[in-house]
Image: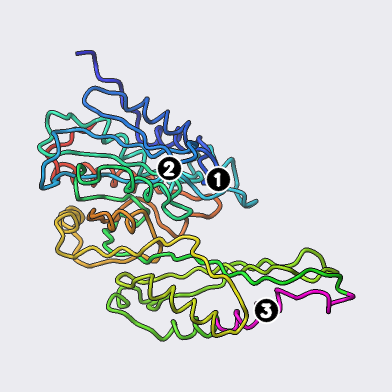
């Protein structure tokens, strides 16, 4: 057998990953090809699941014994896309990894290419012959815009052939998280008729029609603030479902009656809440406002709630010596993966408080600790993971 290709240090691999600009509005195929080539090693089965447009792909890597009906083993999951890096406050090139004090700085270093580098290297360094159960890696696209890659993956892949337990390396400061909020996005449109503003009787102002709709949405927002569910206690900062009007567009010029007005709403639902009931409440509020309006679903990224007694959660908490349940207010691929029957737990290096911001960073020491945590979890779920 030829010698195994070398494995780069995690920070060196991270530098390679962040150099690819995989902002969600761009293709990720070059990065997928790079990782696929890097993991072209004996015992690793590498495949890709392309988007309908063909410009993006989810990378899937599998190793170890064949899956069993019990679906034992472990899946490592991350996403390859990032938010834009257009802020002027960046102190350097966002796509060049820099070290500032003990921080590894770049767009995506925290959310979440730091974990991606670790997961890729763990796969590269694992001896398949020493695994008692399967190990898989799933790296998705377009998580930042609604987990589109995860949705496509579960719609086309044979999910029953993968291990049930999933570690998702979202930035949690290396704490195990078994629940997170969802993100329901809706669009409301009113239609009018354009005319010269000097002759308003010849037109119909769509922006004016939206005013009572906005008032109804604000009333619903205030109603949400007083509501609590069983999981509210795990979100003390914002224990209620949250409705926000996030974007308004209407009109083309100050001397033209607007013929269209669009409002986009974001709703953060708590774990255990179903989106259908909330969608119905929004539709009812808009209808009661009295102005004809269209209501559309842009994206429904569901909350995630994992049983505290689940094996992967208990095992990870044991590795971390963690005894408390934690929740986070952001969403992830876990919402859709859980709908497909996976048991997902979040744990990764970095803090969500620095993600999506200029000079995003992941602490170097958390990268080192995360590598050890992932290796230990792989060992306990699959057998023995070989370190480099």
Per the image, label 1 sits on a secondary structure element best described as: loop
Nearest the camera: 24 or 98? 24
Nearer to us: label 3 or label 2:
3
| 243 left or right, relative to 349 | right
| 146 left or right, relative to 71 | right
Disc 1 from disc 2: Cα separation:
12 Å
Residue 25 x %, y %: 55, 45
Snapshot quadrant of residue 217: bottom right
Q: Residue visible at 23% across and 53% down?
A: 342
Q: Residue visible at 25% across and 20% down?
A: 4
The magenta segment: 198-216
Mark 2, residue position: 80
Disc 1 from disc 3: Cα separation:
32 Å
Give the label on residue 209, or none: 3
Nearest the camera: 96 or 186? 186
Give the label on residue 25, or none: 1
Predominant SS of the magenta segment:
helix
Residue 272 magenta: no
| 134 left or right, relative to 240 | left
Residue 203 x %, y %: 80, 74
Q: Residue visible at 18% across and 65% down?
A: 308
């Amino acid at each position: 057998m030829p010698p195994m290709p070398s494995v780069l240090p995690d920070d060196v691999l991270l530098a390679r990953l962040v150099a690819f600009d995989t902002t969600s509005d761009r293709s990720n195929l070059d990065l997928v090809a790079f990782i696929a080539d890097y993991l072209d090693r004996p015992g690793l089965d590498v495949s890709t699941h392309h988007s309908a447009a063909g410009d993006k792909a989810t990378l899937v890597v599998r190793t170890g014994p064949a899956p069993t009906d019990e679906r034992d083993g472990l899946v490592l999951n991350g996403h390859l896309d990032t938010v834009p890096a257009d802020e002027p406050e960046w102190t350097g090139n966002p796509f060049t990894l820099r070290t500032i004090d003990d921080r590894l700085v770049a767009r995506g270093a925290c959310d979440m290419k730091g974990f991606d580098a670790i997961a890729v290297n763990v796969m590269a360094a694992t001896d398949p012959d020493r695994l008692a159960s399967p190990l898989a890696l799933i790296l998705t696209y377009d998580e930042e815009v609604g987990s589109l890659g995860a949705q496509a993956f579960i719609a086309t892949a044979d999910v029953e052939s993968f291990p049930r337990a999933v570690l998702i390396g979202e930035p949690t400061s290396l704490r195990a998280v078994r629940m997170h909020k969802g993100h329901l996005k809706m669009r409301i449109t009113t239609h009018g008729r354009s005319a010269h503003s000097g002759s308003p009787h010849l037109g119909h102002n769509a922006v004016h029609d939206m005013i009572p709709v906005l008032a109804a949405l604000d009333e619903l927002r205030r109603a949400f603030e007083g509501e609590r569910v069983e999981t509210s206690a795990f979100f003390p900062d914002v224990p209620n479902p949250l409705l926000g009007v996030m974007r308004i567009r209407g009109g083309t010029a100050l001397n033209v009656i607007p013929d269209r007005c669009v409002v986009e709403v974001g709703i953060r639902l708590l774990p255990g809440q179903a989106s259908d009931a909330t969608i119905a409440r929004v539709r009812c509020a808009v209808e009661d406002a009295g102005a004809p309006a269209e209501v559309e679903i842009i994206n429904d990224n569901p909350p995630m709630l994992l049983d505290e007694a689940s094996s992967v959660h208990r095992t990870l908490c044991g590795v971390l010596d963690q005894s408390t349940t934690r929740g986070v207010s952001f969403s992830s691929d876990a919402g859709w993966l859980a709908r497909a029957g996976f048991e997902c737990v979040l744990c990764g290096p970095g803090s969500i408080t620095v993600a999506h911001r200029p000079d995003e960073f992941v602490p170097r020491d958390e990268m080192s600790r995360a590598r050890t945590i992932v290796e230990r979890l792989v060992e306990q779920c699959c057998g023995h993971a070989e370190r480099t």
